[in-house]
Amino acid sequence: MDLKSLKKQESKRKISKGYMWALFCAVFWGIWYLPGTVVWVLNPFDEMYGAIAETGGDGTALIVTAVLITAFNALTVMLALMLWNGVLGKYGELVRTMKEFHPCSKWFFLASIFGGPMAILGSFIAMGFIGGAFAAVAALLYPVVGSILAYYWYGEKISKRAAIGIGVIIVGGVTIFGGGLLTELSSGNVQWIGYLGGLMAAAGWGIEGAIAGKGLDISEPDVGLTLRFVGENIIWWIIIVPILAVFGYPMYSFALQAFEPMTLLVLIFAGITFGFCYVCWYKSFPLIGVGRGQGIGNLYGLFAIIFIFLFFGDVPQWTILVGGTLCVIGSFVMFTEDTSELETLRGE
Amino acid sequence: MSGNRPIKFRILEILLDGKERWNYEVVSKIQEEYGMRSNFHRDSINFDILELASGGMLKDVEQKVDEDGIYKKGFLLHKYVITDFGKARGSDACLRYV
């Protein structure tokens, strides 16, 4: 085979690999909404919600319970990733990277602030207040935030076609989002905290992706993302959970009750799906760019709706079906992009 | 100094002098410095170089077919040079130790 065709073949392989990672991310991410929704009705979280709601009201109870659920989610994700790094033999690289705080690992810790207390907490709040399908589709807007930040901050190119694809995905997301909101508006009972959670998820994940890119430039994704979850565990277990405990919320007594088989199983399931969705997400960025990686990863919204339908039997509204279809179309507009444009992703 | 910095830092550091290098030269140097002998590690280091290149920090300046199996027979070999962006990111990350 001659040099030119071999070159073309290799570039194609690289790009399809990037899209493959992004697609895996979407599947894992979509599945994650199953344990994420189920965990709310399991003890100790169900009891915790009831106990706090008696004295502090429903809103506070939901947020405090969401904090504990998010903290456990971060813990199981970190454990899953530690295992993953062990399999890849990357503990050495993990320590080497962690030591480089100033040039590198500080970006992962910064990313964990937006990824954890903003995006994931927001998602759990949205799941608790409104439901899994809404939580999933509300976050569909995050590529807008991510792509715009990546464009202004480190000059990542967004081709016209990618921009159109992102635009269509957003219209799809807004359709799904708007459908639920309009129904609730007409019934006069709008769960605003839930919708705020959805917006937190969208903004948080967009910002996280753009910040994490700074550190990912110069580190390995498996390692970088483990550090990002080490950061999130520090935020929850060393800062926020103790602070809430000081304010008198029964964090530790309920946290200790989480060690029962069913709850643990669901939490571990959440950790594995979420951990690997991140592995795939981060692996796609260096190959196809933050904007595109996030765009294809966005198919998770559709996967989440399908999985929720299959496992819980929740039939989606027509707005969700229309919006979901738009998301697929938008992703394929990006997917079929002329590959030659992708050879260098950033301006020189 | 070698073997105790993240692998991508070291790759940038090696290329920071602006000279063009073949991927197999960089990969085998890293393998030696970090004691990573297996084929799995070889591919993983090469993937780091790919990531640096698609991140705009290295530029792929020349390719040839690996006829003799220096690296992987029948595959492409790539020659890389550091870009200005790579120099900026590389010296940001590496130079304070040099």
Image (tube, coloured by chain):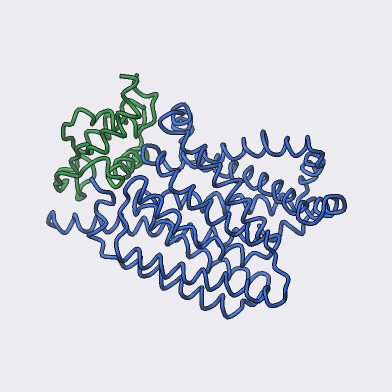
Q: In which quarter of the image is residue A11?
A: bottom left
Is residue A256 positioned above or below A56 on the image?
above
Instruction: Point out the residue furthest to the bottom here.
Output: A318
Instruction: Point out the residue furthest to the right here.
Output: A54
Position of residue B47 measured from the top left corner of the image (x, y, whole percent): 33, 44
Q: Quadrant of the N terminus of chain A?
A: bottom left
User: In the image shown, does A347 or A218 lie closer to the viewer?
Assistant: A347
* Colour for chain A in the figure: blue
Chain painted green: B
Is B51 situated left or right of A144 in this image? left
Residue A86 can be seen, yes or no: no
Position of residue B71 measured from the top left corner of the image (x, y, whole percent): 23, 41
Position of residue B23 measured from the top left corner of the image (x, y, whole percent): 23, 39
Is residue A69 positioned above or below B13 on the image?
below
Q: Which residue is drawn at 74% across and 52% down?
A: A263
Position of residue A163 measured from the top left corner of the image (x, y, whole percent): 35, 64
Residue B31 can be seen, yes or no: yes
